[in-house]
Image: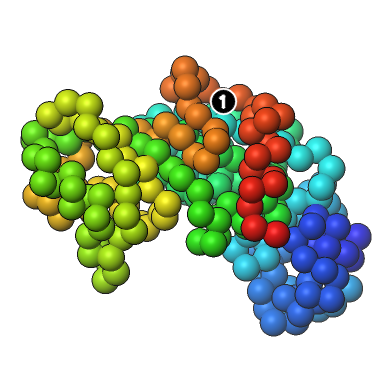
Amino acid sequence: MRLQKFISRAGYCSRRHAEEFILNGKVTVNGQIVTQLGTKVDPEKDKVVVEGTPISPEENLVYIALNKPKGYVTSCSHPGEKIVMELVNIPQRIYPVGRLDKDSTGLLLLTNDGKLHLKLTHPSFDHEKEYLVTVAQPIPQGALHSLEKGLTILGTKTRHTRVKRISDTRFKIILKEGKNRQIRRMIQKVGNRVSDLKRIRVANVRLGRLPEGKWRHLDETEKKYLIEAVPK
C-alpha cells in the first residue's frame, strides 16, 4: 500500500496532508525518514511513525489498560532495560499512551489506534490523571495548598490541581497536564520527596483491582468515552 494512503486510512489525516508530512520529512518507516511519495509499505510488518506518533490501520484496533510495575520503562525499545511491552503479549503492535517513569507504578494505556494516540497525548485534550502519592516526610496542609494552586517547575507554572489528603504522608492528586516527572518535581519544590507514586485513573479509565503487571482490554464504555471525548 502507498504510504500516504496507509496514513490516511489509519485516520490520522487526509491523504493530501499525509503527502505534505512525507515531503516535509516528518514520516519514518522502520525508523528511516521517507520523503518519496508513492513509497510502498506493508501494513502488517512496517512501522510507520508520523510526527512521533505511531500509525496503525483501523482494522483490529485494540485498547488496553496495564498496571505497570516498578522497574519497567515506558518505551517500545530501550536496550538494557525492561520495557512495558514485555508485559502485554498480543499479536497487534501497540504503543504506550504517555509515560510513567521507571520508578512509578499504576495505570498505563496502550493502543494501536494512531489517531487516538495522537489526541490523547496532545495538550488540548483536557483529561484528568489521578495519582496516589506517598511522601517521605509528613506533608503540611500549606504544602498541599501550594500543590493545588500551582508551582513553577521547568520554567513554567503548573496548572491548578485537586488534592485530597489520606494521611500525614499520603494523598491523591488530580492533574490535567503531564510535564516531565511533574509530581516528583512539585513535591521536591515543597521540601519533600516522593517515596511511592501510583497512577490510578486516566480520564474515565480506572486502575481498580487490576493486579500489578497484568492488563485488560478496555470495555465498550471506556472506549466510547475516549474516542468521543478527545478533540476532533
The residue carrying mark 1 is 215
Q: Quick one: label 1, few (<14), some, or many (20+) residues within 10 Å?
A: many
Is 211 rendered above or below residue 195?
Answer: above
Of residues 183 and 50, the one drawn nearer to the viewer in this rendering: 183
Q: Residue most toward the bottom?
A: 24
Q: Residue at x 42, y 51 (%)?
A: 176
Q: Residue at x 68, y 36 (%)?
A: 223
Element marked by disc 1: strand
- Relative to 57, is 147 on the left or the right? left
Is 55 rendered above or below residue 59?
Answer: below
Q: Residue at x 46, y 35 (%)?
A: 201
- Relative to 115, is 64 on the left or the right? left
Please, which colouring scheme is shown?
A: rainbow
Q: Residue at x 64, y 30 (%)?
A: 218
Q: Amino acid at mark 1?
A: Trp
Q: Residue 205: name its quadrant.
A: top right
- Place of residue 196 in the rendered image (x, y in percent of width and height, measured from the top left): 25, 33
Q: Residue 28: name its quadrant.
A: bottom right
- Place of residue 119 in the rendered image (x, y in percent of width and height, measured from the top left): 62, 56
Q: Residue 103: name its quadrant.
A: top left
- Place of residue 217 in the rendered image (x, y in percent of width and height, measured from the top left): 65, 27
Q: Is residue 31 visible?
A: yes
- Place of residue 52 in the rendered image (x, y in percent of width and height, measured from the top left): 60, 63
Q: Is residue 81 visible?
A: no
Q: How many marks?
A: 1
User: Quick one: quadrant of the C terminus?
Assistant: bottom right
